Amino acid sequence: MKYAYMKNHLTSYPVTRICSLLGVSSSGYYAWLKRVNKSAKLSEYIQKQYWQHKARLGAPSLLHDAREAGYQVSERTISRVLQQLGLRSKAARKFKYKTDKAHHNIAPNTLDRQFNPDKPNKTWVTDITYIKTGEGWLYLSVIIDLYGRKVIARQTSCKCPKLSTQLT
C-alpha cells in the first residue's frame, strides 16, 4: 500500500525523501516495482495463452506453457491469476457415441427374445462395435451362433459403411 502511494507521488518528491517519511527502504520500493511488472507480464501472458487455446487450458497446462516461456511460477500462482482475471477453463465433455438417427432398413424382430435355440446354426445374431484407437475408430462386426454361443465370423474395418457382408 505504501509503495503504491509512493508511485503516485514521485512527481512531487524524490524517492529517498518519500521512503524516509514512510519508513521503508528505497531498495524495497524498487523490488516492489519489479514484482508488479513481473506480475503484470505474467497476467498478460496467461490471458494470451488462455484465449489462444480457446479457453480450454487450466492451471496445470498453463503452468507447463509458462515454464517453457521462462516464467518461474507455481501452479497456485497460475490459479490465483486465473481467478483474479475471472477465467475458468472449459470442462471437457464426455464423448457421446452417435449413430444415424434415420435407422433405415430396420429388419423385423423374428427372434422375439428366443435366445435358446434347440439346434446349431438355427439362430445367428450379429452386432457392430466401435473401438477407439490412437489412429481413429475401428469397427468390429461379429456373427455368433446362439446355440453354442460361438463366434461364426468376424470382420474389422476402419470405415463402418464399408463393412463387408462376407465375414471370415
Image (spheres, rainbow, N blue to C red):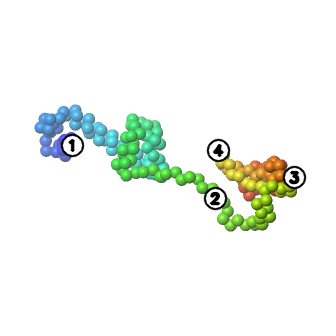
Residue 114 percent coordinates (x, y): 79, 59
Q: Amino acid at mark 4?
A: Gly
Q: Nearer the viewer, mark 2 or mark 4?
A: 2
Name the residue tied to disc 3: 120
Residue 22 percent coordinates (x, y): 14, 38
Q: Is residue 137 above or below residue 105?
A: above
Disc 3 is placed on an element classified as loop
Name the residue tied to disc 2: 98
Q: Is residue 82 left or right of residue 131?
A: left
Which of the two residues, 36 or 149, is positioned nearer the viewer here?
149
| Residue drawn at point x = 26 percent, y = 35 percent | 31
Disc 4 is placed on an element classified as loop
Name the residue tied to disc 4: 134
**How far apart are labels 4 and 1 at the CA level?**
54 Å
Name the residue tied to disc 1: 1
**How far apart are labels 4 and 3 at the CA level?**
38 Å
Q: Is residue 99 left or right of residue 48?
A: right
Residue 75 percent coordinates (x, y): 41, 39
Contact (CB < 8 A) between labels 4 and 1? no
Q: Amino acid at mark 3?
A: Pro
